[in-house]
Image (cartoon, coloured by chain):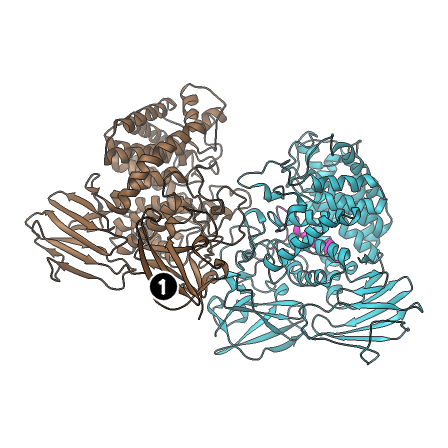
Chain colours: A cyan, B brown
Amino acid sequence: PLRPLPLGSTKLTGGFWLNRQRINRETTIPAAAQRLEEVGTLRNFRRAADEQTGGFAGKLFADTDVYKWLEAVAWEQAREPSTDLADRQSTTSALVAAAQDPDGYLNTYTRLALDGQRYGDLEKGHELYCAGHLLQAAVAQVRGTGDRTLLDVACRFADHLCKTFGPGRLEGIDGHPLIEMALVELYRETGTAAYLELASYFVEARGRGLLTPPGHHGPAYFQDHLPVRDVRTIAGHAVRALYLASGATDVAVETGDAELLDALQATWSTMVESQTYLTGGVGARWYGEAFGDPFELPPDAAYCETCAAIASVQWSWRLLLATGEGKYADLIERTLYNAVISGVSLDGDRFFYVNTLKVRNNAFADDQRSAVGGRQPWFGTACCPPNVMRTLSSLDQLIATSDDDGVQVQLYAPAAVRVGPIGFEVETEYPWHGTVRVRITSTPDTPWTLGLRIPAWAETHRLTVNGFEGPLRRVWAVGDEVVLELPVAARRTTPDERIDSVRGCIAIERGPLVYCFEQQDADVVLDSAAVVAGELIEHEQPNLLGGVTTVDVPTRNGTLTAIPYYAWANREVGPMTVWIREDA
Amino acid sequence: PLRPLPLGSTKLTGGFWLNRQRINRETTIPAAAQRLEEVGTLRNFRRAADEQTGGFAGKLFADTDVYKWLEAVAWEQAREPSTDLADRQSTTSALVAAAQDPDGYLNTYTRLALDGQRYGDLEKGHELYCAGHLLQAAVAQVRGTGDRTLLDVACRFADHLCKTFGPGRLEGIDGHPLIEMALVELYRETGTAAYLELASYFVEARGRGLLTPPGHHGPAYFQDHLPVRDVRTIAGHAVRALYLASGATDVAVETGDAELLDALQATWSTMVESQTYLTGGVGARWYGEAFGDPFELPPDAAYCETCAAIASVQWSWRLLLATGEGKYADLIERTLYNAVISGVSLDGDRFFYVNTLKVRNNAFADDQRSAVGGRQPWFGTACCPPNVMRTLSSLDQLIATSDDDGVQVQLYAPAAVRVGPIGFEVETEYPWHGTVRVRITSTPDTPWTLGLRIPAWAETHRLTVNGFEGPLRRVWAVGDEVVLELPVAARRTTPDERIDSVRGCIAIERGPLVYCFEQQDADVVLDSAAVVAGELIEHEQPNLLGGVTTVDVPTRNGTLTAIPYYAWANREVGPMTVWIREDA
């Protein structure tokens, strides 16, 4: 198994992701603070802190938008402290603390709208889901800034939960998982075993009929159809399913439960083989925001919630650490570059909830979440925007891992890494160019291994140490340079024949990026367009869409231009497709 | 324009549809009476009649299940009176009458659950939807039996509606259309112009923002996004959209509104060209039970609610009468034989809510409506079963139409038709065999035209009068025999290339029937199966599935057997597909 690097061990020093982090910090996070004020989410906390009742604004899980925003701010403070962010953070944290009940419980909806009545609707109430996001924000804050304000709030809340839930106490689980992984993380931070025990209880109690399914849905909607360890095909609401899988993985790792970990790995494999879009997006169904059956992956009807992509990254990260297997990092890379950052505009101020792979000609938006209407400044259910924020703010933490044998680079980006006596710098123009240079900046005088992930998409690669081929386990010297060359040239991808809706189509990929075609770049109606065999011509376009490489694909009478999928809908919003028919 | 024949003008005398009517009468309708008792729907009326409050059972529109059942019984009584049915009918009608408020309003949910508070939630309350079904049942009852009990109830209710709704009164429309066509039919029955005026108001008031969209949905969910006359692409909840279109067509016809009728015809054409499944099923999306964008027609994710297919038949029938164009009867035929009767088991006691075109390997049902779980005896929302009942009970009314020039046979079935001085008998083994014989049994001594629809699926046909080719407008003599021969041999159908999910596939059709493959008839996994070019071999199988012709389709190493789609899921329920890949 691998270990995450201590916070601060990795600094992004430039390139694709640092640019995204900069926009996230300068535009997205401040704009979100304004939205949270405008739509009343922060006012809910103020009213709760003042012991008022009534006047709750938003959806009953709105508290989590503040917690995720606080988490993002905490990671930003770890990356680069600012007094402005520190002020916002301490003001907001104090507000959260002030809204806590004397016994540790905290939920502004319950306080304002339900007269403090707790746990009356575990199916839909989201109380433990809200608690989970608070715990996660608290852990981020203490790690990122040392500020224990939220951690104290979180521990009091977690202590309350330990007293309330479990065998012989209130035997129940939350309709929306999340608390599981939050409790394990709080356990990791504090060492309090009761938090792990409660997380374990919540995982084990699932799939035993404690919840009554809502509306037309069956129990799989919230993963109560089977005990987690009996699941082999992930089902139901995608975000719930993936948060639960993440928490269950945490529990399996911390309790040494190999059977549970095996089940989770098998489920992950089925998901990747048959329930994951090319972009890494997951959740084929709008109805129930749910996973589809295996190979049910329609591009136009895809839901691919931004939060689900983020949850997929969280789960894969946990399995990567648990097993050390590169396939998990492969999915993280695919998902981050495509399904996650498609969820936010290049300017950083507009968001997709749903990340479709195709918008048809004459498509019609009758829902704020529909991509047909373009990215939105905020949502009635605003889970996705702050989830993107915390993901980008903490992205440097996913760059590398370590184990007893050395350090592994999992994602390629310009970065400086320092773990104990080991230090190195990464230089690359990834994902646009495939050359990655790693220069050793400090090293012990004993041998260690520099792990460099070879992405699954790379059919070939070339690796040299100081210009020669050679092993990556060695006694390194400061100044040693490893060069990895990955073949990022544009390629055609053919789908599994069992996916009905893309049969006879190809997609363009380039390195880790999935490409798409937008109608505005095409002379023909995309819905009827078809490409033919022939050379893919790349164009570096520094002034297009923040700087991208486009790919021209031949058709019978001209070419069609593909752009990176993440960058679509940043000019006009119109028809778009990832998959395109190929004329035989 | 065409006219419907007076009730009783057409008697089915045997064959496919009479058999379905027999099962409907002997099994489905009595079983439904029992369900309506078991689930408390009838008890709601009893409690309301007794002026009780509370204790409402079921969904807030449950009253309509009783009304649709009463409508079915009324048509059954017209076909073949029985004292048993007459007893059930008069008991139930009396109960409905007793539940009516003194001012004409009637709704057991409002009475029992809302303390009589009316029209507080026009978006979701379904009060006028319930009223509409009552009006339709009342018209059926007076036409079918002469019994005016329900008609009096309906007129009192309609009078109340006329006093309540309209310009300067309560300016509102119902979230679930239906009242429009019901009011027009009541106007046709009674001649009361106010009913037509109110229907016209409800149609015109739509698309002007009178309704607040529910949940995440936009106004198209209940067709409030555009005035009806401005719509060109049908959108939103399929049943609502089609009931509204039917009512708007009625209004257009009765008020002579050519502009409105043109808009409806254009919308119908777009629907048929790009939003209708091969089965005639409509509604591509589970989410919102809605129409998809043009060419968004995934077979596995198809919703194709049974009620939507029925509503499509109702709309096409109205347009057929309004225009005389055979394409409307073509869609009626396609929809009845495939998307409607797939909704009820061959035994008549189990129902599909959703009529999918594909069930995948390892598909999972997390919803009572999912076809993966097989047909169900009843539903929490039980709209579909009684809708099938009234459709089958009134199916003989769709066989033929008339105009000043003669009589038109729209659907081929063994039947005796008598309209004024014109009479003829139809003999056929349709849909299994393509020969249709029409023998004149009475005729005036002036010329008239016998119209025989040539289905769009028939690439050729042969037509003789007394053995010779000749015109169908003539002075007929008793004993004249017209023989129409239609080529029902199995054929391969290729989809529009813009439908992603069936690209590279073919379907088997035979006459008006769409075929499908069930896993239990295949040696290979259907999801990966492919057929090749070659002869389609037909087998008449009188002992299979109530008597069907199966079609063997060649593959590289053997054959795959197709059965009529309507008959699927009557043995084991497992993987099924209408479309199958074709190896080039």
Q: Which residue is mark 1?
A: B492
Q: Residue furthest right?
A: A445
The reply to whether residue A382 is in sight is no
| Relative to B154, residue A362 above or below | below
Q: Residue at x 54, y 66 (%)?
A: A579
Residue A249 forms part of the magenta stretch: no
User: Residue A405's spot in the image, x, y percent?
Assistant: 85, 63
| Relative to A211, residue A268 above or below | below
| Relative to A383, residue A485 above or below | below
Residue A378 forms part of the magenta stretch: yes
Q: Residue at x 17, y 53 (%)?
A: B437
Highlighted magenta segment, given as a residue range:
A376-391
Residue B526 versus residue A363: which sits nearer the camera? B526
User: Residue B15's spot in the image, x, y percent?
Assistant: 25, 46
Q: Amino acid at mark 1?
A: Arg
The reply to whether residue A454 is in sight is yes
Badge 1 sits on which subunit?
B
Q: Quadrant of residue B215?
A: top right
User: Residue A442's spot in the image, x, y percent?
Assistant: 91, 69
Q: Residue furthest left?
A: B445
Q: Quadrant of residue A223?
A: top right
Residue B306 versus residue A49: which sits nearer the camera? B306
Mark 1 closeness class: few <14, some 14–19, many ≥20 residues within 10 Å: some
- On screen, residue A423 versus residue B437, left or right, reads right
Q: Residue at x 57, y 38 (%)?
A: A214
- On screen, residue B399 versus residue A325, left or right, reads left
- On screen, residue A579 versus residue A46, left or right, reads left
User: Residue B32's spot in the image, x, y percent?
Assistant: 38, 33
Label 1 element class? strand
- Numbered disc total: 1
**Image quadrant for the N terminus of chain A?**
bottom right
